[in-house]
Structures are given as structure tokens and as C-alpha cells.
Amino acid sequence: MTYDQQCQYGREIAASAVAECLETGNQPKLVRKIRDMAGQNTGVSIGFLHSIAERVAK
């Protein structure tokens, strides 16, 4: 998997996690996922965190 593919996969994980949070209201689960991703140094985590940041900064 290329770095770009990893980033895209991270974005997909973020979209799914946010959608689940909106559906269930389980914010602690989303926070745990964010903390987990922040502790990693991969393209997946970068894509995930960048996607979360984009959603917050709109």
C-alpha cells in the first residue's frame, strides 16, 4: 500500500468513526480512536487525523 493509499484509508476510517459517533452519540469511543491514531506514525494515522481536523475547522 502506498503512502497515498494509506492516507486515503485513514480518511475512510475517520469518516466511518465520525458517522458512527453521530449515529450513536458515543463520543468517548471517537475520542479513544483519535487518541489511538495520534499515537501512531503512519500514513493511515495522518489521513485520519487530517480528516478529523478538516471536519473541525469548517
Image (tube, rainbow, N blue to C red):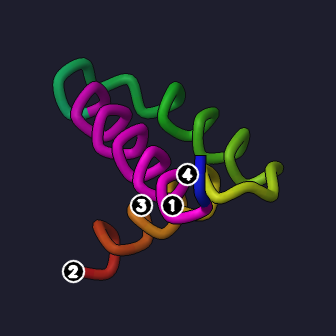
Q: Which residues are magenta?
A: 3-21
Q: Are marks 1 and 4 in contact (CB under 8 Å)?
A: yes
- Mark 3, residue position: 52
Q: Secondary structure at mark 2?
A: loop
In three-dimensional space, the C-alpha distance between marks 3 and 2, rounded to whole angstroms, equals 10 Å
Q: Secondary structure at mark 4?
A: helix
- Name which of mark 4 and mark 3 comes first in the sequence: 4
Query: Residue type at mark 1?
Result: Gly
Q: Are marks 1 and 2 in contact (CB under 8 Å)?
A: no
In three-dimensional space, the C-alpha distance between marks 4 and 2, rounded to whole angstroms, equals 24 Å
Q: Secondary structure at mark 3?
A: helix
**Disc 1 vs disc 4: which is toward the camera?**
4
- Name which of mark 1 and mark 2 comes first in the sequence: 1
In the figure, is residue 21 to the left or right of 13?
A: left
Q: Are marks 3 and 2 in contact (CB under 8 Å)?
A: no
- Mark 2, residue position: 58
- Mark 1, residue position: 47
Question: In the rendered image, which quarter is residue 51 located in?
Answer: bottom left
The residue furthest top is 24
- Mark 4, residue position: 6
In the rendered image, residue 36, in percent from the top left (x then y), is placed at 72, 39
Tally the marks: 4
In three-dimensional space, the C-alpha distance between marks 3 and 1, rounded to whole angstroms, equals 9 Å
- Name which of mark 1 and mark 4 comes first in the sequence: 4
Question: In the rendered image, which quarter is residue 19 located in?
Answer: top left
Query: Residue type at mark 2?
Result: Lys
